[in-house]
Image: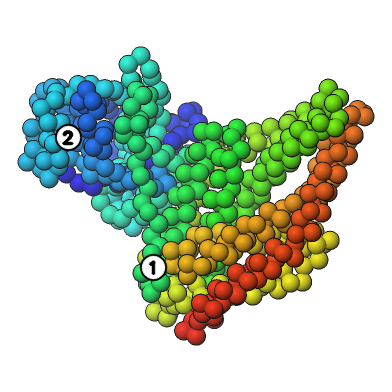
């Protein structure tokens, strides 16, 4: 009657691939019986004041193959599209809602308290065709693949359903991620973070009563410091893969908001930083493969972000120019060129992500890190504390060397130090629960350093972009505006240069404080800390 349901949900980015997906060679190879198809009609019930949704419970009646089934689901987590929740199913003879069959289960008391004496009434429904293929994966796990195509109904509102559910029937959850990654290699798929219940609640205007399935918290705790470094760092990397997947979905839902792109880029940078941090513990070939794939998308996100930042700088200049050049806004030709370039670059990125091009990378890395987390080895493995102390010591040594020798006129060196500072800062943030408290002081100092170096670096970014934008323009106003933004960026750069010594001194002091907390711990025995 009851079990903990675990399923990976993937949205089809292209509705025309349905038939090709169902006949994929991989599925034919893994299938244990012929595919089947059924029509599912489901009605969700609640009280008039949504007491079930408020209690993170759901009650539904579903008709399939002439049989009614009542289902209660409770709570639930959603991590990168992997949904887990308690589920209770009971065959019933009537389409009339009743909690009586569940009262003898361990959810019965909670269900009865939520409903009390109030009647259950329909709130929304779904109707879809489900194609089912039962699969046996190479590790012996049994998975039911269900491709659902249909609709959600809430009053007079309607929304399409087109998704793949990989439900674990027996075996290890790792098999779900492996299968999802394999399918995403061949088909345009996106991790789906929201259940049908949540999407129906949004459609009905009841989402505030339900709330999304919550992700599991970071696996990193103070107590993690004594555990094997590879196992803990693998789990932390998986957690950050989930963060990237969530940030990508938010960005795809709101692609025109600058902050959604920024948050997506930061999530990806944190992931890349953690993988770099863990490099000595990972197989060299696999490390290079995954890091190269992520770096490619990092560059694409960076290109869009650079244009966003440049556009914001132009807006600042335009506001200032209104005060000293009243005619400046009469023909904003450069502004139009910036906007066109920015939109074209954003569209290319959005189209690639919306087509699921990043999905096989994220799911594949997730499956790889699960293997690392479960890896049994006879080789001695340092604890997280031992590894982290020595690795951070190595990174800080290289970072201080770069900063102390920095020539602010060498914009390549400025860029190198800025990237190193970002990686260090984001890794400190990601590992914060297992690090000394005052490591966060360094993180704050690094953020200011990052902003300062960014203003200096803008001087290198501006000329080639302006050359590309105005090379075909004969407008004097366009060339005048190019001169204005160049001077504006140069002034910001010079101000950052003037503050450099003060900012760098604060960074050095913050590093020194961490050293006093035995960053170079005498107990650290891991000697594998290659290049930064």
Q: Position of residue 394 (x, y in %)?
A: 60, 75
Q: Residue at x 93, y 29 (%)?
A: 476
Front-lying residue, 475 or 43: 475
Q: Position of residue 65 (x, y in %)?
A: 20, 26
| Local secondary structure at mark 2 | helix
Q: Position of residue 305 (x, y in %)?
A: 66, 43
Instruction: Left or right? Give the position of 401 relative to 114.
Output: right
Q: Distance from label 1 to label 2 (Cα)?
A: 37 Å
Q: Is residue 82 above or below residue 375?
A: above
Q: Is residue 16 above or below residue 249?
A: above
Q: Is residue 120 above or below residue 86?
A: above
* Residue 262 picture quarter: top right
What crowding class fits label 2: few (fewer than 14 Cα within 10 Å), some (14-19), or many (20 or more)? many
Disc number placed over residue 164 in the picture, else none: none
Instruction: Left or right? Give the position of 43 relative to 375.
Output: left
* Residue 167 picture quarter: top left
Identity of the residue furthest to the front in this view: 323
Front-lying residue, 51 or 212: 51
Instruction: Left or right? Give the position of 383 relative to 352.
Output: left
Instruction: Left or right? Give the position of 487 relative to 194.
Output: right
Q: Position of residue 488 (x, y in %)?
A: 82, 43
Judging by the rendered image, the residue that carries numbered circle 1 is: 222
Q: Residue at x 44, y 56 (%)?
A: 238
* Residue 153 picture quarter: top left
Judging by the rendered image, the residue that carries numbered circle 2 is: 114
Res. 337 in view: no
Q: Residue at x 52, y 42 (%)?
A: 248
């Amino acid at each position: 009657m009851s079990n903990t349901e675990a399923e990976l949900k993937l949205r089809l980015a292209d509705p025309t691939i349905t038939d090709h997906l169902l006949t994929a060679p991989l599925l034919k190879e893994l299938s244990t019986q012929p595919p089947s198809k059924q029509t599912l009609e489901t009605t969700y019930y609640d009280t008039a004041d949504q007491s079930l949704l408020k209690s993170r419970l759901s009650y539904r009646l579903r008709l399939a193959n002439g049989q009614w089934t009542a289902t209660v689901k409770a709570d639930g987590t959603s991590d990168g599209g992997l949904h887990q929740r308690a589920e209770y199913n009971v065959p019933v003879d009537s389409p009339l809602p009743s909690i009586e069959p569940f009262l003898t289960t361990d959810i019965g008391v909670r269900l009865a308290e939520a409903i009390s004496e109030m009647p259950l009434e329909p709130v929304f429904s779904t109707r879809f065709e489900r194609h089912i293929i039962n699969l046996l994966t190479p590790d012996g796990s049994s998975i039911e693949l269900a491709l659902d195509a249909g609709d959600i109904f809430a009053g007079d509102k309607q929304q399409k359903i087109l998704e793949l559910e990989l439900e674990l029937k027996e075996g290890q959850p790792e098999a779900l991620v492996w299968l999802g990654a394999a399918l995403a290699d061949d088909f345009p798929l996106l991790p789906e973070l929201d259940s049908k219940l949540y999407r129906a609640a949004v459609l009905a205007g009841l989402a505030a009563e339900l709330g999304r399935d919550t992700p599991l918290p970071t696996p990193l705790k103070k107590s993690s410091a004594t555990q094997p470094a590879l196992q803990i760092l693998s789990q932390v990397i998986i957690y950050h893969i989930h963060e990237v997947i969530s940030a990508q979905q938010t960005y795809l839902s709101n692609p025109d908001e600058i902050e959604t792109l920024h948050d997506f880029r930061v999530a990806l940078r944190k992931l890349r930083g953690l993988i770099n941090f863990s490099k000595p513990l990972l197989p060299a070939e696999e490390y290079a493969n995954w890091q190269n794939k992520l770096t490619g998308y990092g560059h694409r996100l960076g290109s869009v972000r650079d244009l966003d930042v440049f556009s914001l700088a132009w807006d600042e200049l335009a506001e200032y120019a209104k005060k000293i050049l009243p005619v400046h806004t009469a023909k904003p030709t450069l502004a139009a060129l910036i906007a066109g370039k920015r939109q074209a670059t954003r569209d290319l990125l959005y189209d690639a992500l919306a087509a699921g091009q990043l999905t096989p990378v994220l799911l594949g890395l997730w499956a790889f890190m699960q293997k690392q987390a479960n890896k049994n080895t006879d080789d001695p493995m340092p604890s997280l504390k031992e590894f982290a102390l020595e690795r951070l010591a190595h990174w800080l040594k290289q970072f201080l060397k770069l900063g102390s020798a920095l020539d602010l006129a060498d914009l390549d060196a400025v860029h190198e130090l800025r990237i190193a500072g970002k990686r260090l800062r984001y890794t400190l943030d990601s590992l914060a629960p297992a690090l000394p408290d005052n490591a966060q002081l360094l993180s704050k100092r690094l953020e200011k350093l990052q902003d300062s170096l960014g203003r200096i670096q803008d001087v290198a970014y501006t000329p080639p972009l302006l050359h590309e934008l105005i090379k075909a323009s004969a407008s004097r106003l366009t060339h005048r505006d190019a001169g204005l933004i160049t001077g504006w960026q140069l002034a910001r750069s010079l101000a950052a240069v003037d503050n450099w010594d003060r900012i760098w001194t604060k960074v050095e002091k913050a590093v020194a404080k961490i050293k006093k907390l035995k960053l170079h711990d005498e107990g650290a025995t891991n000697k594998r800390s290659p290049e930064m």
